[in-house]
Amino acid sequence: MNPEFSQTRSDAIRAGLEHAVSVHTPDSVRRVPGWITGASLLIVGLVTGGAVSAAAVTGLQGVVSLVGPTNIAIEAPPGVLPGVPIISLLGETESYEITGEATVDLSAPPDGATHVRATISCLTVGSFNWGIDPTGNNPSIYCGAEDVTSGSGSASMDFPLDTGTQRIFAQTGPQGRALLVVQYVNYVPTALGRNASGETYGVAWTGLEPDLVAVDGIAPDGSSFVGYARATDLDAFGPDWPGQPSSPEEALEWQRERDERYPDGWEIPVYSSDGRTVLGRFLVSN
Protein backbone atom coordinates (compact mmCIF):
# COMPACT_ATOMS: atom_id res chain seq x y z
CA MET A 1 0.00 0.00 0.00
CA ASN A 2 1.24 3.47 -0.81
CA PRO A 3 1.56 5.32 2.50
CA GLU A 4 1.16 8.68 0.71
CA PHE A 5 -2.30 7.89 -0.68
CA SER A 6 -5.42 7.96 1.41
CA GLN A 7 -8.77 7.13 -0.21
CA THR A 8 -10.46 8.49 2.91
CA ARG A 9 -8.75 11.81 2.42
CA SER A 10 -9.67 11.90 -1.25
CA ASP A 11 -13.31 11.16 -0.45
CA ALA A 12 -13.33 13.79 2.28
CA ILE A 13 -11.94 16.40 -0.06
CA ARG A 14 -14.64 15.70 -2.61
CA ALA A 15 -17.38 15.83 0.04
CA GLY A 16 -16.12 19.10 1.46
CA LEU A 17 -16.10 20.88 -1.87
CA GLU A 18 -19.63 20.20 -3.01
CA HIS A 19 -20.59 23.64 -1.65
CA ALA A 20 -18.49 26.15 -3.22
CA VAL A 21 -11.27 24.97 -32.70
CA SER A 22 -11.02 22.66 -35.50
CA VAL A 23 -11.81 18.95 -35.63
CA HIS A 24 -9.58 16.55 -37.54
CA THR A 25 -12.00 13.64 -37.92
CA PRO A 26 -14.88 15.04 -39.98
CA ASP A 27 -16.43 11.62 -40.56
CA SER A 28 -16.84 10.94 -36.88
CA VAL A 29 -17.58 14.40 -35.52
CA ARG A 30 -20.57 16.63 -36.14
CA ARG A 31 -20.60 20.12 -34.69
CA VAL A 32 -23.68 21.15 -32.75
CA PRO A 33 -24.72 24.50 -31.23
CA GLY A 34 -22.69 25.59 -28.21
CA TRP A 35 -23.98 25.61 -24.66
CA ILE A 36 -22.63 26.40 -21.21
CA THR A 37 -23.24 24.24 -18.14
CA GLY A 38 -22.27 26.83 -15.51
CA ALA A 39 -19.50 29.12 -14.33
CA SER A 40 -18.78 27.93 -10.79
CA LEU A 41 -16.30 25.32 -9.70
CA LEU A 42 -18.22 23.18 -7.23
CA ILE A 43 -15.87 20.25 -6.90
CA VAL A 44 -12.12 20.05 -7.02
CA GLY A 45 -10.18 17.08 -5.82
CA LEU A 46 -7.75 14.30 -6.51
CA VAL A 47 -8.16 12.10 -9.54
CA THR A 48 -6.60 8.74 -8.86
CA GLY A 49 -7.09 7.21 -12.29
CA GLY A 50 -9.38 4.54 -13.65
CA ALA A 51 -12.89 4.60 -14.93
CA VAL A 52 -15.69 6.59 -13.36
CA SER A 53 -19.23 5.26 -13.45
CA ALA A 54 -21.91 7.60 -14.65
CA ALA A 55 -23.79 7.01 -11.42
CA ALA A 56 -20.86 8.50 -9.52
CA VAL A 57 -21.19 11.77 -11.39
CA THR A 58 -24.97 11.96 -11.52
CA GLY A 59 -25.93 15.51 -10.62
CA LEU A 60 -22.34 16.71 -10.83
CA GLN A 61 -22.49 20.39 -11.80
CA GLY A 62 -18.84 21.23 -11.28
CA VAL A 63 -15.59 19.82 -12.48
CA VAL A 64 -12.63 17.84 -11.27
CA SER A 65 -9.26 19.34 -12.13
CA LEU A 66 -6.32 17.11 -12.96
CA VAL A 67 -3.69 19.57 -11.80
CA GLY A 68 -3.30 22.45 -9.44
CA PRO A 69 -3.01 26.11 -10.32
CA THR A 70 0.24 27.60 -11.56
CA ASN A 71 -0.24 31.30 -10.83
CA ILE A 72 0.66 33.17 -7.64
CA ALA A 73 -2.00 32.55 -5.01
CA ILE A 74 -4.14 35.38 -3.68
CA GLU A 75 -6.07 35.58 -0.43
CA ALA A 76 -9.41 33.78 -0.69
CA PRO A 77 -12.24 36.33 -0.90
CA PRO A 78 -15.35 35.99 1.28
CA GLY A 79 -17.40 32.95 0.38
CA VAL A 80 -14.46 31.05 -1.13
CA LEU A 81 -12.74 28.28 0.80
CA PRO A 82 -8.99 28.88 1.11
CA GLY A 83 -7.18 26.87 -1.54
CA VAL A 84 -10.09 26.78 -3.99
CA PRO A 85 -9.13 28.53 -7.24
CA ILE A 86 -11.27 31.31 -8.64
CA ILE A 87 -12.34 30.27 -12.11
CA SER A 88 -13.52 32.42 -15.00
CA LEU A 89 -14.88 31.15 -18.30
CA LEU A 90 -13.22 32.50 -21.41
CA GLY A 91 -14.61 32.69 -24.93
CA GLU A 92 -17.44 30.59 -26.31
CA THR A 93 -18.10 26.90 -25.86
CA GLU A 94 -17.52 24.54 -28.78
CA SER A 95 -19.73 21.43 -28.94
CA TYR A 96 -19.19 18.30 -30.99
CA GLU A 97 -21.15 15.11 -31.45
CA ILE A 98 -18.60 12.31 -31.68
CA THR A 99 -18.60 8.70 -32.83
CA GLY A 100 -15.48 6.54 -32.80
CA GLU A 101 -12.28 8.57 -32.42
CA ALA A 102 -12.11 12.35 -32.54
CA THR A 103 -9.50 15.06 -32.03
CA VAL A 104 -10.18 18.68 -31.09
CA ASP A 105 -7.47 21.27 -31.77
CA LEU A 106 -6.40 23.48 -28.83
CA SER A 107 -3.54 25.35 -30.51
CA ALA A 108 -5.16 28.80 -30.33
CA PRO A 109 -6.52 29.36 -26.79
CA PRO A 110 -7.72 32.85 -25.83
CA ASP A 111 -5.46 35.14 -23.83
CA GLY A 112 -5.45 34.29 -20.15
CA ALA A 113 -6.54 30.69 -20.56
CA THR A 114 -4.80 28.38 -18.08
CA HIS A 115 -6.98 25.29 -18.54
CA VAL A 116 -9.46 23.81 -20.96
CA ARG A 117 -12.67 22.32 -19.60
CA ALA A 118 -13.91 19.28 -21.49
CA THR A 119 -17.33 17.85 -20.69
CA ILE A 120 -18.52 14.59 -22.17
CA SER A 121 -22.16 13.52 -22.14
CA CYS A 122 -23.32 10.06 -23.18
CA LEU A 123 -25.86 9.84 -25.97
CA THR A 124 -25.78 6.03 -26.01
CA VAL A 125 -24.95 3.23 -23.61
CA GLY A 126 -21.26 2.42 -23.40
CA SER A 127 -17.79 3.52 -22.31
CA PHE A 128 -16.25 6.81 -23.37
CA ASN A 129 -12.88 8.37 -22.67
CA TRP A 130 -11.52 11.83 -23.26
CA GLY A 131 -8.39 13.75 -22.36
CA ILE A 132 -5.06 15.13 -23.53
CA ASP A 133 -3.05 11.87 -23.72
CA PRO A 134 -2.78 10.75 -27.35
CA THR A 135 -2.11 7.15 -26.25
CA GLY A 136 -5.60 6.96 -24.73
CA ASN A 137 -4.56 6.91 -21.07
CA ASN A 138 -7.34 9.34 -20.23
CA PRO A 139 -10.31 9.64 -17.86
CA SER A 140 -13.27 7.49 -18.81
CA ILE A 141 -16.95 7.18 -18.01
CA TYR A 142 -19.41 4.33 -18.41
CA CYS A 143 -23.07 5.09 -19.03
CA GLY A 144 -25.92 2.65 -18.58
CA ALA A 145 -29.38 2.90 -20.10
CA GLU A 146 -30.74 4.86 -17.14
CA ASP A 147 -27.90 7.39 -17.40
CA VAL A 148 -28.72 7.99 -21.06
CA THR A 149 -32.49 8.30 -20.66
CA SER A 150 -32.21 10.57 -17.60
CA GLY A 151 -29.50 12.72 -19.13
CA SER A 152 -27.31 12.22 -16.05
CA GLY A 153 -24.46 10.45 -17.82
CA SER A 154 -21.86 13.17 -18.02
CA ALA A 155 -18.56 14.20 -16.48
CA SER A 156 -16.25 17.17 -16.76
CA MET A 157 -12.50 17.64 -16.40
CA ASP A 158 -10.23 20.67 -16.51
CA PHE A 159 -6.93 20.00 -18.29
CA PRO A 160 -3.90 22.31 -17.97
CA LEU A 161 -2.63 24.32 -20.88
CA ASP A 162 0.83 24.87 -19.39
CA THR A 163 2.21 21.48 -20.39
CA GLY A 164 2.15 21.86 -24.15
CA THR A 165 -1.44 20.70 -24.44
CA GLN A 166 -2.45 20.94 -28.11
CA ARG A 167 -5.40 18.58 -28.53
CA ILE A 168 -8.19 16.77 -26.77
CA PHE A 169 -8.67 13.15 -27.76
CA ALA A 170 -12.06 11.49 -27.37
CA GLN A 171 -13.14 7.94 -28.08
CA THR A 172 -16.41 6.03 -28.06
CA GLY A 173 -17.22 2.40 -28.72
CA PRO A 174 -18.01 1.24 -32.28
CA GLN A 175 -21.68 2.23 -31.98
CA GLY A 176 -21.29 4.81 -29.26
CA ARG A 177 -22.20 8.49 -29.51
CA ALA A 178 -21.38 11.29 -27.13
CA LEU A 179 -21.47 15.07 -26.93
CA LEU A 180 -18.11 16.74 -26.22
CA VAL A 181 -18.20 20.37 -25.03
CA VAL A 182 -14.98 22.40 -24.83
CA GLN A 183 -14.60 25.62 -22.83
CA TYR A 184 -11.43 27.57 -22.00
CA VAL A 185 -11.05 28.78 -18.41
CA ASN A 186 -8.72 30.88 -16.28
CA TYR A 187 -7.61 29.75 -12.83
CA VAL A 188 -6.53 32.18 -10.12
CA PRO A 189 -5.37 30.13 -7.12
CA THR A 190 -6.13 31.16 -3.56
CA ALA A 191 -3.81 30.67 -0.61
CA LEU A 192 -4.50 28.44 2.36
CA GLY A 193 -5.65 30.11 5.56
CA ARG A 194 -3.57 30.08 8.73
CA ASN A 195 -5.05 30.10 12.22
CA ALA A 196 -3.69 31.52 15.47
CA SER A 197 -1.92 28.22 16.21
CA GLY A 198 -0.02 28.41 12.96
CA GLU A 199 -1.97 25.58 11.32
CA THR A 200 -2.95 25.88 7.68
CA TYR A 201 -6.53 25.19 6.69
CA GLY A 202 -8.49 24.92 3.49
CA VAL A 203 -8.85 22.72 0.45
CA ALA A 204 -6.28 20.05 -0.28
CA TRP A 205 -5.60 21.35 -3.78
CA THR A 206 -2.74 19.80 -5.75
CA GLY A 207 0.54 21.03 -4.27
CA LEU A 208 -1.19 22.34 -1.14
CA GLU A 209 -1.40 20.14 1.94
CA PRO A 210 -3.25 21.91 4.75
CA ASP A 211 -3.10 20.73 8.34
CA LEU A 212 -6.88 21.09 8.50
CA VAL A 213 -8.70 19.79 5.42
CA ALA A 214 -12.11 21.09 4.36
CA VAL A 215 -14.74 18.35 4.66
CA ASP A 216 -18.51 18.03 4.69
CA GLY A 217 -19.24 17.45 8.38
CA ILE A 218 -22.33 16.29 10.25
CA ALA A 219 -23.60 18.66 12.96
CA PRO A 220 -25.12 17.40 16.24
CA ASP A 221 -28.61 18.02 14.83
CA GLY A 222 -27.80 15.90 11.77
CA SER A 223 -27.43 18.77 9.33
CA SER A 224 -24.50 19.10 6.97
CA PHE A 225 -21.89 21.84 7.17
CA VAL A 226 -18.41 22.62 5.87
CA GLY A 227 -15.71 22.34 8.51
CA TYR A 228 -12.18 21.06 8.86
CA ALA A 229 -10.78 17.64 9.78
CA ARG A 230 -7.17 17.09 10.70
CA ALA A 231 -5.11 15.69 7.87
CA THR A 232 -3.55 13.24 10.33
CA ASP A 233 -7.01 11.87 11.18
CA LEU A 234 -7.94 11.54 7.51
CA ASP A 235 -4.64 9.90 6.62
CA ALA A 236 -4.72 7.39 9.46
CA PHE A 237 -5.45 3.79 8.53
CA GLY A 238 -7.88 3.64 11.44
CA PRO A 239 -8.51 4.83 15.00
CA ASP A 240 -5.92 2.40 16.36
CA TRP A 241 -3.44 2.86 13.49
CA PRO A 242 -2.30 6.50 13.20
CA GLY A 243 -0.01 5.75 10.27
CA GLN A 244 -0.07 3.50 7.24
CA PRO A 245 1.08 -0.12 6.91
CA SER A 246 4.61 -0.74 5.70
CA SER A 247 3.92 -3.86 3.64
CA PRO A 248 1.05 -5.61 1.82
CA GLU A 249 1.02 -8.30 4.49
CA GLU A 250 0.73 -5.75 7.28
CA ALA A 251 -1.99 -3.94 5.34
CA LEU A 252 -4.09 -7.11 5.09
CA GLU A 253 -3.66 -7.82 8.79
CA TRP A 254 -4.54 -4.27 9.81
CA GLN A 255 -7.56 -4.28 7.51
CA ARG A 256 -8.82 -7.55 8.99
CA GLU A 257 -8.52 -6.18 12.53
CA ARG A 258 -10.01 -2.82 11.58
CA ASP A 259 -13.02 -4.39 9.89
CA GLU A 260 -13.67 -6.51 12.97
CA ARG A 261 -13.43 -3.58 15.39
CA TYR A 262 -15.15 -0.96 13.24
CA PRO A 263 -17.49 -2.72 10.80
CA ASP A 264 -19.48 0.48 10.23
CA GLY A 265 -16.50 2.82 10.03
CA TRP A 266 -15.50 5.38 12.63
CA GLU A 267 -15.94 9.06 13.37
CA ILE A 268 -13.38 11.83 13.57
CA PRO A 269 -13.99 15.37 14.86
CA VAL A 270 -14.66 18.29 12.54
CA TYR A 271 -13.42 21.67 13.73
CA SER A 272 -13.83 25.30 12.90
CA SER A 273 -10.80 26.86 11.22
CA ASP A 274 -9.22 27.45 14.64
CA GLY A 275 -8.54 23.72 14.92
CA ARG A 276 -9.91 23.65 18.46
CA THR A 277 -13.66 24.24 18.38
CA VAL A 278 -15.41 20.96 17.58
CA LEU A 279 -18.48 21.56 15.40
CA GLY A 280 -19.45 18.03 14.48
CA ARG A 281 -18.14 14.78 13.08
CA PHE A 282 -17.05 13.12 9.88
CA LEU A 283 -17.76 9.43 9.24
CA VAL A 284 -14.80 7.51 7.84
CA SER A 285 -15.85 4.35 6.01
CA ASN A 286 -13.80 1.17 5.79
Image: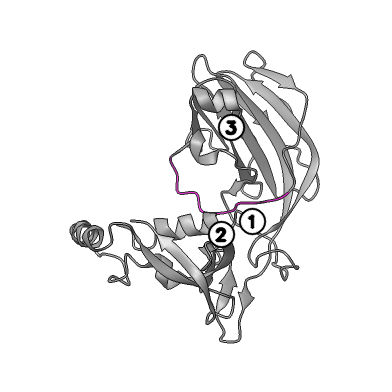
Three-letter amino acid code of the residue under disc 3: Ser
Mark yes or no: residue 24 visible.
no
Question: Is 279 positioned to the left or the right of 75 in the image?
Answer: left
Three-letter amino acid code of the residue under disc 1: His
Find residue 41 and report its horizontal and vertical position in percent.
67, 51
Colour setup of the view: one colour
Label 2 or label 3, whichever comes before in sequence order: 2
Circle 3 SS class:
loop
**Which stretch did the figure color magenta?**
40-50
Three-letter amino acid code of the residue under disc 2: Gly
Q: How many labels does the image show?
A: 3
Closer to us: 75 or 39: 39
Q: Quadrant of the N terminus?
A: bottom left
Find residue 78 and report its horizontal and vertical position in percent.
75, 68
Q: Name the residue under label 1.
A: 19
Q: Give residue 52's mark.
A: none
